[in-house]
Amino acid sequence: MTTKKQPPAKRAPEEPVGRPENPFISTEFFSRMRDYTERDAAFSKEIKAIGDRGAGKLSTDARTAPSLEPLRGVIKKGLPLKDMFGRIVQGVELGLWEPWLSAFGFELRGVNYAKTGARNARLALDISLASKATTVFANAGIPNWRSLVAEDCAQVQIEKPTEKTPAKAYAIFWLDGADA
């Protein structure tokens, strides 16, 4: 035994770790996984991967996000979603915004109602298991839409399930940002 203190072990400098991969972005992987996984379990795995990876922030404006293209052309309440977004940015028909958006699975989380200036609307798209948007994306042939939307959005919010409430997840987008 020695009474000399040993020098601390040299550690290799740690490489900065990037965002973890989300395998569900691949439609092929998603389809294979769905062949052998129950619906609820598949949803849980995808939401966990989305939560681990976080928001991609690739296209945070809901008017231009490529992942929302299937939704923007759908007509509900007499208007396509892209026209609804345009009216929100213009600041007209204020009382209709929330019912319009809810038909697509969006919630209006915050907005500047001032007559002048940018709207700066904060929209939350429900990406939960029972989302109203699921049908639109399924009809467009996009089974892994949640992962694709998470790559475009500004923020992902996931609320864990309880005994009485199911898991809820939201992709947050903006309208009328600083570049508008």
Image (spheres, rainbow, N blue to C red):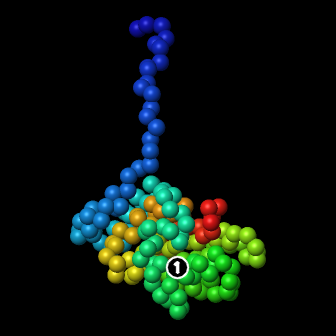
Quadrant of the frame with the C terminus: bottom right
Image coordinates for residue 78, horizontal then vertical, percent? 52, 92
Image coordinates for residue 170, horizontal then vertical, percent? 52, 69
Q: Nearer the viewer, residue 124 or 93?
A: 93
x 58%, y 72%: residue: 123
Quadrant of the frame with the N terminus: top left
x 44%, y 67%: residue: 66
Identify whether 93 is placed above or below 66.
below
Image coordinates for residue 154, horizontal then vertical, percent? 54, 61
The residue indicated by pointer 1 is 82
The answer to which quarter of the image holds residue 12 is top left
Q: Nearer the viewer, residue 60 or 23?
A: 60
Residue that lies at the very extreme toward the right in this rendered image: 115
Identify whether 29 is placed above or below 87.
above
The answer to which quarter of the image holds residue 73 is bottom left
Q: Is residue 160 visible?
A: no
Image coordinates for residue 95, horizontal then vertical, percent? 68, 87
Q: Secondary structure at mark 1?
A: helix
Q: Is residue 114 visible?
A: yes
Q: Amino acid at mark 1?
A: Lys
Residue that lies at the very extreme toward the bottom in this rendered image: 78
x 68%, y 83%: residue: 92
Identify whether 128 is placed above or below 179.
below
x 53%, y 71%: residue: 63
Mark 1 is surrounded, within 10 Å at the Cα level, by few (under 14), some (14 to 19) or many (20 or more) other residues, namely some
Residue that lies at the very extreme toward the front in this rendered image: 180
Q: Nearer the viewer, residue 53 or 11?
A: 53
Q: Nearer the viewer, residue 147 or 44?
A: 147
Q: Is residue 173 left or right of residue 45?
A: right
